[in-house]
Every structure is written in C-alpha cells, then in structure tokens.
Amino acid sequence: MTRAPWLARSGAACVAALACYSLGGCASARPEQKLQVATATGRLVPLDSVTVSYTVGGLQVIQRANYANDVVAVHLYLLGGRRQLTEATQGIEALLLRTSKYGTAKYPGDATRKAWARTGSEFDIDASDDWTEVGFRAVTADFDSSWNVFAERVMHPTLAPASVALVRDQMRSTVHQRLISPDGYLRLLSDSVTFHGRAYGYEPYGTEQSLGTLDSAALAAYERTQMVTSRMLLVVVGNLSRAAVERAAGATLATLPRGDYVWSLPQDSAPPPVPVVMRERPVATNYVLGVFEGPPASAKDYAAFRVATALLSSRVGDMVRDQHRLSYAAYAPFTDRGVSAGGVYFSTSSPAHVLPLVKDQIKWVEHVPPDSIDMPYFTAGFIFDYLASNSTDDAQADFLARAQLYQGDYRKASDAMEELRNVTTGDVRSAGKRYFSRIQFVYVGDTTRVSRKDFSTF
C-alpha cells in the first residue's frame, strides 16, 4: 500500500490494523476510522471533521481540505450518465468534453492546449454509468491557472467542425477496435443485450453509428441545454481553502443557468433474461460473460450483494482457474453504480466443461453453510482496498461523491466498511438467492463448443 502523509501516525496505525485483519484476529479493529488529515496548522483531525458541503450560486460543492501536501484534486460530476443518452446521442458528452481540448472562447484553437501544458496539471474525463466526471489534479500553486482553463473547457468550447471531426474519428476508431477484440465485443454486446431499452443500455463513449451523426450543431445544442448547475456536483479534496474554491467557482461554473435537473437513483426493473446470446468468432479461446442485476446502491442488502459477488468471484477463480486449469481469467465482476450488477466471466477453450463448475459455485454461495466462512477475515480485503484507495485525493473525492449521490449524504462514505463488516453468511445466502438466479449470458467464440441448453439450466 502506498503510504499517504495524511494517514494517522504516518500510516503506522493503519498498517498495524491491516496486518491484524489479514490474520483474522482483530474483528473489533476499525482502521478506516483512524484516517486523518492535516489542518492548516498541521494538527491531525478525522476526515469528516474538515469535510463540508455548501453551495456557490446553484452549484453544490463538497470539499475536504488537507494541508499535509501541495496536491489538490478537482472532480466535477455531470449527473445522469447513460440516462442522459438516447440511441442517437450515445457518446455526445464524452465527444463534447474531448473536443473542448481544441479551443475555447478565451483560448481559441491550439491556445487551449498550450495554456493547459503550462500548468503541468493532469486533466481527466471519465464518462460512466451514472455521471461523467471531468476534472484535474494540480499542485496548489497551479490551481488558479488550471481552473481557468478547466472552466473554459466546460463552459465555452468553440467546437469547430474540424475539431469535432478529429475527435469523433478518434472515438469511432476506439469503438471499432473494441468490436474487433473478442473480449471487447463481448462486453459491449453484454451491455446492449442485458440493458436494452433501459437505464444502462446506452454506451457513454458512443457507437460507430451514433458518433457518425454527431456534429458541431448537436454538441452546441447539448452544451446550451445540459451544462446547468442542477446537473453538477463539484468535489474538491486537497490543499486548498474554501475561500479559494468559492472564488473560482463563483466566477465561472456558478454563473451557468440553474436548469431543472433532479438527481435520483435509477428505478430499473429487469425483464426476464433470455438464456444466452451467442456470436460466432473463429477464435481458439471463447469468452463468456453472464450478468445479473443487483439492488440499488441505497438498498439495505447492497453490502450483502457486494460480499456475495466477491465470494462467488473467489470460488469461481479457485475452481475454474486454479483447480481445473480451464481458464486464465475466471471471476465474478461487481459493478458499483446506482443499480448494481454482478456476474460471472471466463475465457476458455472448453466452455461446456466450465459452465457446470460455475453453476456449482453459484449454488454454493446461495446455500453457504453458516460456519464455512470467516466473515471478518473475508471482508478484510475490502478494508485493505478502502484504505489503499483513500491514500489519494482523487479516490477520496470519488468516495464522497458516491456517498452523496447513492446514499444521500457524503458523510456515509465513512460507514461503508461498517456495513460490510455487519454482513452475515445468512445475508450472503439471501442476496445470492435473490439476485443470482436471473443471469443474462453473452457468448463470443466457437459456437460449436457449447449448446444453448448448457446456459438454460442457470
């Protein structure tokens, strides 16, 4: 684990707690509650004690100040994600933000890239399921200059036709490369099949067809109507005062129209899945992905579903990869979003042999014996990942945003590990029985190596 300067006692207490957890002997330890940040005077205080929420104009801001280093992470969440999209507009937000690199009103043409290069900061764009995150990492001394270019790109992109065409062709090429790759095609196909016509059925980075129709006029119209503060959540973590954030946001983003967007979790009801969608590819290795929809992120059994999926992943990997050596990659993916998802994934030359093994592991989780799992030991992995992630300002910003948007309160970010600790084997059984039974499989490979009825027994 990378040691961060704001960890309690230079990280020693957390490292000791992690070691204790890894041995399964410290069930009462709460290492995440010992995480601290440094105030402006150098005093160490708990994370949440210096985390505040406020508004600047119509813009909601969550800020966690940390003066232990000179780094600041800025995350602007444009809410909606895939729900913002239609069949024709898939990829529009990612295309808009990427094109802003090539000119804004204040920094026309190549001046945008030159101005940003002078800051030395890192710019990020990530279009995902429930939002698009755009932001940057900077040292404190470069915050003002970085913010100026960042805000310009969000608010005033020029969207010249030649620039739109350049970025559009780049994005279409990336999509095409994913379609060529059997594994990439599998994942794209799974989303389109499993969530067809529903909240998560559209591609944040677009399809070849949708990107081909998006032009400067479409992007400009989207910019005018969708860049509104009601769609925005700004999270800032690092060495920066509240006054500096209020000053920067107040002069730029807060001047955007308020709009009437209202954030809510998706209310998605999954239709009965078909057993499998199969696509022929002349490859030696076959790829299989089965997806089952889980509970909303606000549900009481969300933590149990997460643990159940992790347990399934461990069992599938051990049985398929380690014991039977039928796959180099076999696991159960978990998707953390407004409406969660889990699944089973494997690549193999013998799919008909792997499927029964996977089914057995699903049934085992659904009927896991009460004393067969040392839950404190098993959930220690989650604690380790949480502590490791919290060693960066970027990850802290993401934790805070997810707690605010999924749980309704950024302070609940600190409760996530406690909810996982409270999961029992009975909770795991219940989650497995409730959610694992509705699996939508997608298969890419040699269709003569497996039959449809092999999937219908799940």
Image: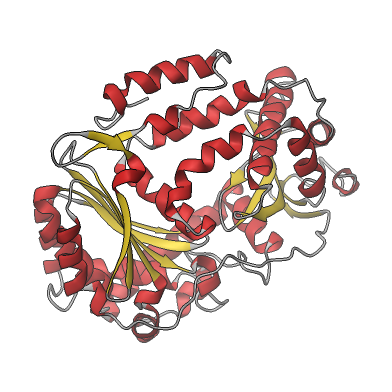
Residue 412 or residue 275, whichever sits in front = 412
Residue at 27% x, 78% y: name it.
159
Seen in the picture, residue 398 relative to 419 is either above or below; the reply is: below
* Residue 421 on image: x %, y %: 60, 32
Residue under the image location 43 percent in, 50 percent down: 411
Compare residues 292 and 28 and report the one nearer the observer. Answer: 28
- In the displayed structure, 389 sits above or below 184; it is above
On-image quarter of the C terminus: top right
Relative to 163, is 437 on the left or the right? right
Horizontal side, residue 41 vs residue 411: left or right:
left
Residue 206 visible in the displayed image: yes
Q: Quadrant of residue 270?
A: bottom right
Residue at 51% across, 74% down: 84
Q: Can you give x and y, in whole percent of width and height, for residue 338 in the image?
A: 57, 58
On the image, the x and y values in percent for residue 71 come to 19, 43
Q: Is residue 441 left or right of residue 11?
A: right
Q: Quadrant of the N terminus?
A: top left
Q: How is the image coloured?
A: secondary structure
Q: Is residue 215 above or below residue 138?
A: below
